[in-house]
Amino acid sequence: MLLRHPHVWVLTDDMYEHLVYDDFVFTTPAQVEPKLYDRTLTVNGVSKTYCMTGWRIGYGGGPKPLIDAMATLQSQSTSNPCSIAQWAAVEALNGPQDFIARNNKVFKERRDLVVSMLNQARGLSCPKPEGAFYVYPSCAGTMGRTAASGKKLETDQDFVTELLEAEGVAVVQGTAFGSGPAFRISYATKTEDLEEACRRIQRFCGNLS
């Protein structure tokens, strides 16, 4: 489709390129079809792989005319990354990379834990993600049931609200990402916190009538 329409450019977000698990191999679009190389803008950053979320640093690579236009626009903006954050990102990208594999091992273990525990919760179905550090379980099996508060669950917004009220677990409803009924959990946190949160989710689901 893209080759048939050469006026269309490609923007590829490669933020999670290193956060992949099992046998999944990350591939960016220009690798799949090299003919797209001259009209592909690749964006990335240090927030995920390098655990530098608060530094707010991203970067892009693409055809020179496009990058020049982006630089012109950016030069007129009053919101820019500070020099400290930029040099920190340079060090992250050019420094030792061995920690990435160690981090991925921990993330994979946390992923497997969360997926297993959520799939044991009544009414939930959690697919196993191949990358990043989020799970996106379906709560369709809980729709129509009633929470301990007496509230009937009709949407994933009802689910996340009642879960927060009953168990103190904050998750994000799937409709915020364009799909539901589901919810999203990040497993980029301590393993013991994840275990406790999943136990509470299991208890919440088990108490639905």
Image: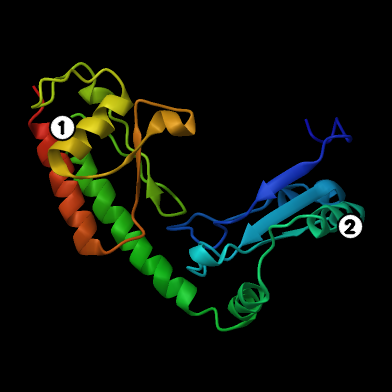
**Callout 1: SS:** loop
**Callout 2: SS:** helix
Tell me which corner region of the image, top left, top right, bottom left or bottom right, holds residue 148.
Answer: top left
Q: Which residue is denoted by mark 2 in the rendering?
A: 68
How far apart, in angstroms, are the residues tagged by discs 1 and 2? 54 Å
Q: Which residue is denoted by mark 1 in the rendering?
A: 122
Q: Amino acid at mark 2?
A: Asp
Tell me which corner region of the image, top left, top right, bottom left or bottom right, holds residue 157.
Answer: top left
Q: Is residue 125 left or right of residue 83?
A: left
Residue 165: percent from left, percent from top: 17, 36
Q: Amino acid at mark 1?
A: Arg
Q: Outermost residue, front direction?
A: 78
Q: Is residue 18 left or right of residue 79?
A: left
Q: Residue at x 25, y 32 (%)?
A: 161
Q: Is residue 25 visible?
A: yes
Tell me which corner region of the image, top left, top right, bottom left or bottom right, holds residue 108.
Answer: bottom left
Q: Is residue 53 left or right of residue 102?
A: right
Residue 174: percent from left, percent from top: 39, 32
Residue 144, placed above or below residue 92 = above
Q: Earlier in the sequence, mark 1 or mark 2?
A: 2
Residue 7: percent from left, percent from top: 89, 34
Number of marks present in the image shown: 2
- Badge 1: how crowded within 10 Å, few (<14), some, or many (20+)? some
Residue 177: percent from left, percent from top: 47, 34
Residue 19, placed above or below residue 121 = below
Q: Is residue 182 left or right of residue 98?
A: left
Label 2 near label 1: C-beta < 8 Å? no
- Badge 2: how crowded within 10 Å, few (<14), some, or many (20+)? few
Q: Nearer the viewer, residue 58 or 26?
A: 58
